[in-house]
Amino acid sequence: MTAIGSLHYATDREQDETSTLGVSDVIFTSESEVTQFSSIAPDAMWIGSWSIPDAPPLRVAFSRQGQYFREADVWHYSGIAILATMLTQIINSPADIPAGPIVSNSLPIWLAQNSYNGNSVQVFPSFLVPENLPGRYIVAHIEPTMTEALGAFPVIGPWPGTIVPNSGASPFHDLASSQLCRDEVTLTLYGFDNQAAWQWWSALIEASAAGIAPFGFANSPVLRDEKQKQTELATLAQKKTIHISANYLQGTADAVARRLILSAMLSSIEVIGGVTSTGTGASTQAPQTASGEGFVYE
């Protein structure tokens, strides 16, 4: 779809230990409300493409709508252009999704713990929870600076592993590797009362003892009640946490990840419009004529 309006952006250079990025703050002022922005579901995303002379298109996803002024009858949408380090996360078709696991920690083990006592529950990675999702669900957060090796050295091989077909003159290899590690994991439970939380927690203990959840406890975890408030309601959310020091083999976590990938329904992914495209548009109102670049979405 194409939205007509004006785009304002300012770019700053930000440099840290691992990257140097051009960060573009963007404000799009639209002549009419873009209803698609307010009606999208958690499984949909709009990415805008703005053509720039002698440069790659500016690709934008908006995170905020505000400053609506009824008398002026204009809508403002703001966000940050997609960072260079995030471009690997944008796909144009399901075929672009990597066939193998991405993460290297114990995250797949926790994502697989999505049932207890005949009930199902959604488990999400931290920072990747769909927008405005009501409970009951669980979030698994693994502290990135706390992953440590318990084995003396990783077991890798045998070299060179299995060559990945059609991977070029310098082919990639599926190389088996494993190391005994420990992660510091925080599991956050939303919408669970005391009994439901204990049922899921007991199912996790039993799965660990039986080897269904391939990890071991290095501490004695406890259910904790957290405080998440909303002043307008003068109430607290049903939020509990469990902190686990978990021992696991990286090779086992890799196997769990591959099973999860095989069970995913890739056929449900739809890319509207395919690859990035650009275009122009105009809006005419008597007795005046207003024109502007078209913001093309994919």
Image (cartoon, grey):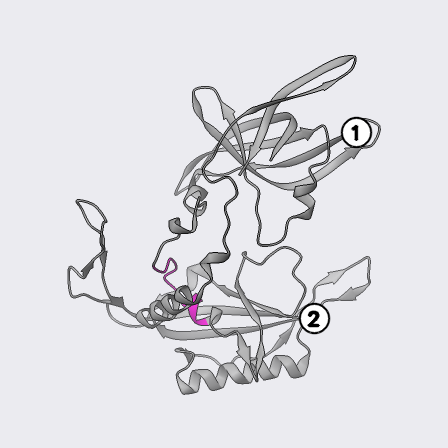
Give whichever of 26, 258 is nearer the camera: 258
Q: Quadrant of the N terminus?
A: top right
Viewed as shown, does residue 268 lie left or right of 63? left
What's the amino acid at mark 1? Answer: Asp
- Image x and y of residue 64, in percent: 66, 41
| Label 1 Cα neighbours within 10 Å, binned few <14 / some 14-19 / many ≥20 | few
Above/below status of 13 relative to 87: above
Q: How far across and down, in percent of the image, does residue 206 sit?
A: 48, 86
Residue 230 sits in quarter:
bottom right
Q: Which mark is residue 199?
A: none
Q: How many marks?
A: 2
User: Residue, x 44% and y 82% (percent of image)?
Assistant: 208
**Label 2 secondary element:** loop
Compared with 216, 277 (above or below) is above
Please, is residue 54 above or below residue 44 in the view? above
Foreground disc of the pair 2, 1 = 1
Please name the amino acid that badge 2 sits on: Gln
Q: Which mark is residue 73?
A: 1
Q: Secondary structure at mark 1?
A: loop
Q: Which mark is residue 238?
A: 2
Which residue is more in the foreground, 106 or 148?
106
The disc, 2 or 1, on the residue closer to the chain's N-terminal end is 1
Horizontal and vertical percent position of residue 172:
22, 52
Left or right side of 289 for 176: left
Span colored in magenta: 100-109
Q: Which image quadrant is residue 71 in?
A: top right
Q: Pointer 2: residues within 10 angstroms few (<14), some, or many (20+)?
A: some
Residue 257 highlighted magenta (yes or no): no
Q: Residue at x 73, y 38 (%)?
A: 66
Q: Residue extending furthest right?
A: 71
Residue farthest to the top, as pictured: 287
Q: Which residue is outermost to the left?
A: 159
